[in-house]
Image (cartoon, rainbow, N blue to C red):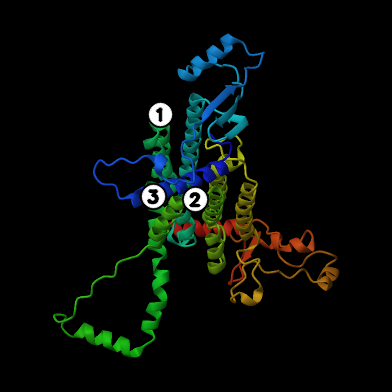
Amino acid sequence: MVPTNESMISSRTALIEQIDKRVEELKSLSLWGDQIIDDRELPMSVNFGCVFEIFAQLEPVPSDVKLFQLLEYEKETENPQGISTIRPPPLKMSSVMYSPNCGLAMTSDDGVGTKLERYYSKAVSYATMAIILAIIQIFALIHQMEYTPTPSSVSNVSYWTIAMQSMMDGYLCLLHLTTAVVIETVFMPFATAAFFSFILVSVFGMRYLLLIWRIQRPESTRPSNNNNNDNPNTNRQEEQNTILPLANRPQTTPQPVSDPRHALLLFGLFLFYQTATRSAFVQSIIIGTLGFGFYSYWIPQIVRNIIRGCRRPLSRRYVIGMSITRLAIPLYFYGCPDNLIAHEPSPWIWALVAFVALQVLILFLQDILGPRFFVPEKYLPQTYNYHPILPAEDEENLQENGGKSSRHPRDCAICMLPVDTSPGGPPGLHVLGRAQYMLTPCQHLFHTDCLERVSIIILIY
């Protein structure tokens, strides 16, 4: 029994070194058959005959807790009936481990533990939380799939954003399933959590990924097709091939389609295996790096918005729902002091929360201010501006007409209601007012909401 994880790792390293040394010395003796050797005859520098005696004592129960209350609590933990009991007192123990022949002693005065029944109850509570989070994510993904019903709307969604979330769900499903198989007492709740994570990945996530891949696949083949079409000799050769018989044309074997997600999945499993066999410091570095890497899943969508110049490719309900639910499990393990794996709270978890919140903020600002609002103009291509600054009323015309406007009211061509084009508010917020209207190349003025809704209806029907 050692007080900290670092002490345990140091003790284990020292013992392994001594055991390896002992094995090498036994191998050097070259024993044959049933030959026996006495350990006292070996010139060992370390005495392996240390006998330890352990003395431990639990702290007494507080005086305000009665015996019948404790018995009622013990009965409820062993056979849960749903009745309310007292809050269990903290389980603390002081211990001394002493070796009289080696002169070694280790003491621990602040040992804190948890009853086995209480630990299983916490495991069930965690599995219930994981089930609820998976169900919320399933409905959020269904809403996003309904939010992008047309190929043009699906083409604006980043493939890697959905792929990174699916890989996270796959790892979580594997972790819950492994826990359910190893610990039979919590098999049912953890197997249920693994089942809902599997449904989220295989039924909805993979289906949406396949749809995005099929629609966005021509984007990767478009440059090669353009290069082939620019060569007149290639076109002439293709025309000759279509006229000549096809009997002697060689058969081309299709190239296998490689998916980088498979390599990333195997690499992640390798890192998880290495993490389990390393020290606490190395574990913190690997888990922190993987955490910030996986929780960058909104960055590919931000980049795609900049490249394509699209706004609102993702539903706000989907963005908020996925961000909150995916942060719940890291917050539980690294922010809650009474978590399932007894991990101490880490302040770096709030840096992860701030990192995800920053990504969500950029996504929302892209919806309001435009997808390229933070990119310098010299790096942007020349595109048509649907939100231009409309000229104000001429002051001379206003004076001639007695202060009345000589223009007709600027009405929306869809709802026929007036469109407010005045640059009201502070000068720095004029772009927010311009986002409320759109001027098409044919010089028709619309409300932004009206034109976007009509465009979606036209694309669907």
From the image, tell me which residue sits under label 3.
25
Kind of residue at disc 3: Glu
Q: As drawn, is 27 to the left or to the right of 125? A: left
Q: Is residue 55 above or below residue 309?
A: above
Q: As drawn, is 311 to the left or to the right of 218? A: right
In the foreground, 383 or 156: 156
- Residue at the extreme left of the image, as rendered: 247
From the image, tell me which residue sits under label 1.
185
From the image, tell me which residue sits under label 2.
278
- How crowded is the residue under tag 1: few (<14 C-alpha within 10 Å), some, or many (20+)? few
In the foreground, 258 or 340: 340
Q: Position of residue 53 (x, y in %)?
A: 52, 28
- Spatial separation of the CA atoms under disc 2 and disc 1: 28 Å
Quadrant in the picture for the C terminus: bottom left
Q: Position of residue 460 (x, y in %)?
A: 44, 56
- Residue at the extreme top of the image, as rendered: 68
- How crowded is the residue under tag 3: few (<14 C-alpha within 10 Å), some, or many (20+)? some
Question: Which quadrant of the figure has residue 198?
Answer: top left
